[in-house]
Amino acid sequence: MAKDWLMHPWLERFLPDHLRPVDDHIFSDAHGLVIVQETEAALDRLIDYGKQVKSAQTFKKNGKTFHFRLKINQKRMKVLSYETHKSEAAIKKRIVIEYIRKAYLPKSRQNRCKEATVQYIKNGQTFVRSIQKSSYFQGVFDKLELLDEALLGGLIEKKTNHDLSVSAPSPEPTEDKDLIHSSEEPFYYIRELEEKRERSWGALPSMIDNRLKLLLEETQEAGSVYDSLDIEERYTVKRMLTRDIPSLLDTYLTLSEENRQQQTKQLYEALVKMEVNIRTLREKAEVTKVDKMEQLLELSERRYPVRKRNNAPE
């Protein structure tokens, strides 16, 4: 309540920098939205793998224009997310969020967020502002809550399994089973998109529909090497199938006829780029498998050399 009172507009000028709310225009342009979306995407990936995350660990995601760090221990999670010098953003931003975990503050979500600030330079001056009330970051805070729950669930499950003296029989797998780390994962999402293509995307122009069909076929082929991809590459495939393709096509179909005509070429190019990206991942994985095979053959030859028998008479 006291914090809400401090947020009253006429008191803002008396607040220290880190408590003043950030102006929304800092995140309203394309670059501002990207850093928020990339932060959410990194947290999404960790939520998916929550049961496998240790209670104390540091995660990193390094891109050309964006870096992400998340440090987790038993008491808190600390996020550092920032744009690199290679980013084209006019105002480069550095986000810091410190979150106290539910085990220590179970009741008040607001108090669990010990720090939530953005630092940026504008007109040669450095600013530090609060993002706790920013509408752009409510999704990030929601995902921190979900990640905390996923981590807690994983720890409880591990403890329960450890305490069992006799193993219970495994339940039969269900259709909504966890597909993470499963070679069936991409095929599951491809089938969903193929069904949506027939059911919901019938109004797509033929050139877009054909391009989508080729993209799904390429992804189907890539599924054979899915287990050879690293975590980042698997996440790229999953994000494309579950978020990027549906969002692009659903949004395109909501446009007016005139706007659709203007956006068709860009949509076509976006699907081509996705297809090229998937093909590149597949070809890279194939090369890696061939290299591994050659290494195994070489190792086998060293371990089990063929020795010629000496049959010459004495």
Image: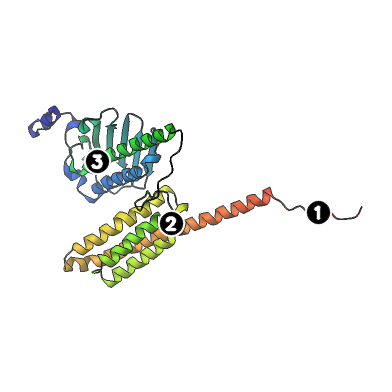
Percent x, y for residue 190? 36, 60
Image depth: mark 1 or mark 2 in front: 1
Q: Quadrant of residue 196?
A: bottom left
According to the image, label 2 marks what residue? Answer: 281
**Alpha carbon of mark 2 to alpha carbon of mark 3: how far?**
32 Å
- In this picture the colour scheme is rainbow
Percent x, y for residue 249? 26, 62
Residue 274: image tag:
none
Sequence order check: which comes first, mark 1 or mark 3? Answer: 3
In this rendering, would 211 be left or right of 181?
left
Sequence order check: which comes first, mark 1 or mark 2? Answer: 2
Q: Who's the residue at 23% across and 51% down the image? A: 30
Image: 38 above or below 283: above
**Alpha carbon of mark 1 to alpha carbon of mark 3: how far?**
71 Å
Q: Who's the residue at 35% across and 29% down the image? A: 74
| Residue 144 in sight in this render | yes
Residue 309: image tag:
1
**Alpha carbon of mark 1 to alpha carbon of mark 2: how far?**
47 Å
In-front residue for pair 50/158:
158
Circle 3 packing at 10 Å, graded few (<14), some (14-19), many (20+), is: few
Circles 1 and 3 in contact, beta carbons < 8 Å: no
| Residue 85 in sight in this render | no
Residue 142: image tag:
3
Circle 2 packing at 10 Å, graded few (<14), some (14-19), many (20+), is: many
